[in-house]
Amino acid sequence: MHDEFPRIKKDDLQSDFPGVFDTALYVGVGIGWLPLVRDFVTEALPHDPSLEVLEMKEKWGALRIWSDTPVVAARLAKGKAEIKSAGVCEVCGEPGYVRRPPPGRYAWWRCRCDEHASDDQRTWPRREVGALSGMMQVRGTWYRYDEAADAMIETAPPEFR
C-alpha cells in the first residue's frame, strides 16, 4: 500500500523554475525532499540554462530525477540530490534512512525519520550500503559525494569484490 503524505506540487516547481518542469510527466515525491530539488535546480541551471526535468519520483527509497542534460556539472548536481535523499526523511526533511521491507514482504522502500515511519516500518532493516553508495560515473569519470564539502568529488573507480 502506498501511504499518503504531503507531496511536492508540479505547479509550484513550474512557477519557481519556469521552463524546467513544464514537460515533466510525473512529479511524485514528498515535500521533505523539496530543499534537495531546489538545490539541484539552483546548482544545475547556471551550467545548463535549457535544463528540463522529465520525471521525478521515489525509487528504492531515494529521489530519482530524470533529466537528459548533457552538461557534467548539471548531472553531478542531480546525482548529489539523489544521493543525499537517502539520508533525508521524504516527509519532513529531517535526517532519516532508507527502510527496506523484510525478505518476502512486498512494500515500498521508504526514507523516513523515526517520527514519520509507521510502527511496522520502524522494525524494517536499514538498506545495506553497497560498493556504489554515494558514487556515480559521468562520461567515464567516477565521483563520490563528500558530505563535508557538500559536493561531488572526482574519485578512483570503486573496487568490486
Image (cartoon, grey):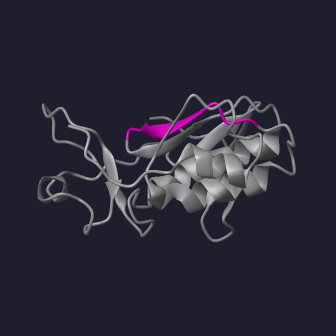
| Residue 58 drawn in magenta | yes
Q: Residue at x 49, y 46 (%)?
A: 133
Is 105 situated left or right of 128 in this image? Answer: left
Quadrant for the N terminus, please: top left
Decide which of 4, 46 is in the foreground and name it: 4
Q: Say if 98 sits above or below 138 in the image.
A: below
Decide which of 156, 94 is in the foreground and name it: 94
Decide which of 9, 136 is in the foreground and name it: 9
Is 40 situated left or right of 147 in this image? Answer: right
Quadrant for the C terminus, please: top left
User: Residue 16 appears at what percent x and percent y?
Assistant: 70, 55
Q: Say if 101 sits above or below 42 in the image.
A: above
Looking at the rendering, the stretch of residues picked out in magenta corresponds to: 52-60
User: Residue 144 appears at what percent x and percent y?
Assistant: 63, 51
| Residue 62 drawn in magenta | no
Residue 134 seen in the figure: no
User: Residue 99 appears at what percent x and percent y?
Assistant: 28, 51
Q: Residue at x 39, y 48 (%)?
A: 129
Q: Residue at x 38, y 38 (%)?
A: 60
Decide which of 153, 37 is in the foreground and name it: 37
Q: Say if 129 sits above or below 50 in the image.
A: below
Q: Quadrant of residue 115?
A: bottom left
Q: How many marks?
A: 0
Residue 118 seen in the figure: yes
Q: Say if 15 sits above or below 57 in the image.
A: below
Is 25 situated left or right of 42 in this image? Answer: left
